[in-house]
Amino acid sequence: MKLLRVGPVGGERPALLDQDGTLRDLSALITDVDGALLADDSVLSRVREAARSGDLPVLGAEGLRVGAPVGRVGKIVGIGLNYHGHAAEVGADTPAEPILFLKAPDTVVGPDDTVLIPRGSVKTDWEAELGVVIGSTARYLGSAAEGLAHVGGYLLVNDVSEREFQIERGGTWDKGKNCETFTPLGPWLVTADEIPDPQVLDVKLWVNGELKQDGNTSDQIFPVGEVVRYLSQFMTLYPGDVIVTGTPAGVAMGQPEPKPFLRAGDVVELEIEKLGRQRQEFKSA
């Protein structure tokens, strides 16, 4: 299923995109698309049955804002340098273990919402990424197969990053990852049953119409199941938590001087097959 949240900021309601591309209202069945929904197989089954029946009310999509497809996100865990091509382009060694950072849930915006370039920023960068949404509580998992079994769904993420803040200002990466609006999610969450192998997905990103990233999740150093297993050794993962699994080659930081970091007025578009497409205009904070 393709699950969405639509409507104004703070007033989003749950919706579903059916097989014909028709937007359907789920408000009569569920209160939100969140961890509680993903963890409840009986409610998910009722949603699937309602979708198959074709009786769900139709929503007019024209002019309707699409919000982030997951509500009440508990935590966002990022994985750094997780593609062979990206590690190579920035001159980094292949990590022996996953590199972790955290993003605050209040950085989340919708897939087409405006993204703000922080005040004083000269190195705001793009990162198209596969996002993983946890569907059941994960603690001390023993295998990558167990890791995959705890995934509730997948979505598209732009892990917007400020490289000076991240790398040149001391401390951890977090200060370059947590600026306002730095985590566009969506447009929809695809339940895990529709993505049997997350390691075969094309990932693309354009800046002002020019293709910058053209990768595939097969290039990940640590695949999705292993990432979930690994994280569960250090933290408990709860339904609705989001893991941002790394970006392929093609970021501004990895390109020759003068590096084409983002400026106000730039338009970024990105997509992952089966997970939809985003479009953001960048403006000054």
Image (spheres, grey):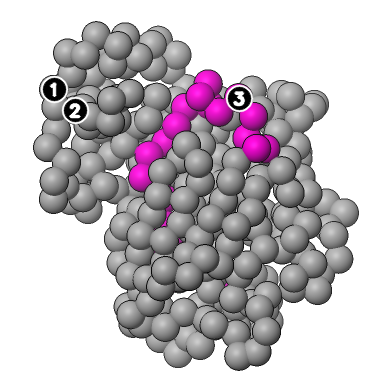
Depth check: give the residue in front, 106 or 109: 109
Closer to the eye: label 3 or 2: 3
In the rendered view, would you say 265 is above or below 154? Answer: below
- Residue range of the region highlighted in magenta in the rendering: 176-200
In the rendered image, which quarter contains the C terminus?
Answer: bottom left
Residue in view at x 60 percent, y 90 percent: 258
Q: Which residue is under mark 3?
A: 196
Q: Which residue is under mark 1?
A: 57
Amino acid at the residue labelled 3: Pro
Distance from disc 3 to disc 2, alpha carbons, whole Å, reads 26 Å
Instruction: Decide whether residue 203 is among the magenta residues.
Output: no
Distance from disc 1 to disc 2, alpha carbons, whole Å, reads 5 Å
In the rendered view, would you say 272 is above or below 81? Answer: above
Taking the image as drawn, is residue 16 in sight?
no
Extreme residue in the front direction: 210
Q: Position of residue 203 (x, y in %)?
A: 57, 51
Q: Which residue is under mark 2?
A: 25
Check residue 224 in the rendering and tell me which mark sits there, or answer none: none
* Label 1 close to label 2 by CB (< 8 Å): yes
User: Element type at marker 1?
Assistant: loop
User: Element type at marker 3?
Assistant: loop
Amino acid at the residue labelled 2: Asp
Residue in view at x 30 percent, y 60 percent: 113
